Amino acid sequence: MTVLKEGDKAPEFKGLNQNEQIISSSDFAGKKVVLYFYPKDNTPGCTAESCNLNENLADLHKKGFEVIGVSPDNAASHLKFIAKYDLKFNLIADTEKTILNLYNAWGEKSMYGKTYMGVLRKTFIIDENGMIIKIIEKVKTKEHTQQIFKELAL
């Protein structure tokens, strides 16, 4: 598996969103994208991260960013999550972990001394040309938008 790094071309992806519509990277050609990977809908950290991005969506849009979330939850779970928190962006249901693997966001984790495979919470900032300009691997869920702006010096 190729490890992605800043300056690499972002891998092309496509998957079903919460409405079971196909969303692909080509839909965002010429736009900047915040592509964030999170473990599970309706869990504390994932809710904090998604709500923080949603609460700051107007500022992200002003700076030219679209936001896309990806997790292994199914479309129905995403639809409920979006409705519960009034999220205003697409969530991709990556039940087969295709996009997660493409972006090295699926891997070995450990908790309480046990190792298991799971989602590695991370965010990729992709520019208008489809290049990865920033990878955030230590996500601050409650202040993720501010973290993005700080990392990009915006």
Image (cartoon, rainbow, N blue to C red):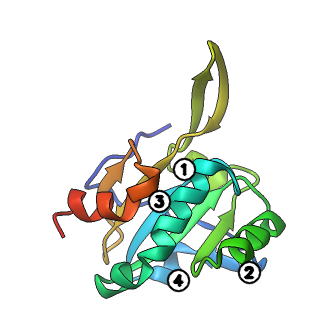
Q: For the residue marked with disc 3, what is the amino acid?
A: Pro
Q: Is residue 23 left or right of residue 142?
A: right
Measure the C-alpha gap from mark 4 to mark 2.
12 Å
Q: Nearer the viewer, residue 26 or 16?
A: 16
Badge 1: residue crowd in 10 Å (few <14, some 14–19, many ≥20): some
Q: Is residue 146 left or right of residue 69?
A: left
Q: Quadrant location of residue 82?
A: bottom right
- Report whether residue 132 is seen: no
Q: For the residue marked with disc 1, what is the amino acid?
A: Leu
Dot 4 or dot 2, earlier in sequence: 2
Q: Is residue 15 left or right of residue 122?
A: right
Badge 3: residue crowd in 10 Å (few <14, some 14–19, many ≥20): few
> Is the residue 32 above or below the residue 2 in the image?
below
Q: Are marks 2 and 3 in contact (CB under 8 Å)?
A: no
Q: Tag 1, which secondary structure? A: helix
Residue at numbered disc 1? 102
Residue at numbered disc 4? 27
